[in-house]
Amino acid sequence: MTDAALDVDEAVFDAVDRIPPGRVSTYGAIGRLVGVGPRRVARALSRGGGAVAWYRVVRADGTAAEPVRARQMELLATEGVPVRNGRVDLAAVGWSG
């Protein structure tokens, strides 16, 4: 991996670390904060292991991506994030930085 790719990953991790417990953001919102697209955010989070609160980042429609959907919604529920029909209410708990 190049130094530039590592820098982007670190920027994504830093942005995700700022999401408060009980709140969520989207791949697109994090991408706008660090200047990359939502897919690049997802790629960085997939490489982050458990070092960051990856589960606080959801799709633009408030859903989680497979194959982590069940685990992600479980982790969000433990933080008090209301999950209904597999979807987070972004208007209620969304965070955009």
Image (cartoon, rainbow, N blue to C red):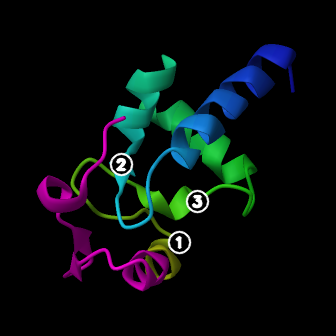
Where residue 68 is drawn, which disc sits there?
1
Label 1–label 3 contact, CB within 8 A: no
Mark 2 or 1, closer to the camera: 2
| Image position, residue 86 (x, y; %) | 27, 77
Give the residue pinned by disc 2.
25
* Position above or below: 46 against 92: above
**On the picture, is 79 further left or further right than 92?**
right
Residue drawn at (45%, 49%) of the image:
19
Query: What crowding class fits label 3: few (fewer than 14 Cα within 10 Å), some (14-19), or many (20 or more)?
Result: many
Toward the viewer: 86 or 52? 52
Q: State the residue at coordinates (69%, 32%).
A: 9
Q: CA distance from mark 1 to mark 3?
A: 13 Å
Cα gap from disc 3 to disc 2, whole angstroms: 11 Å
Q: Earlier in the sequence, mark 1 or mark 3?
A: 3
Q: Which mark is residue 53?
A: 3
Task: Give how far across and how far down residue 92 sits, in percent.
Answer: 15, 60
Q: Amino acid at mark 1?
A: Val
Write the start and end of the magenta stretch as one range.
73-97
Judge from the rendering whether residue 38 lies leftward or rightward of residue 48; answer left or right: left
Q: Is residue 75 magenta?
A: yes
Q: Answer with mark 2 or mark 1, whichever residue precedes in sequence.
A: 2
Query: Is residue 43 in view?
Result: yes
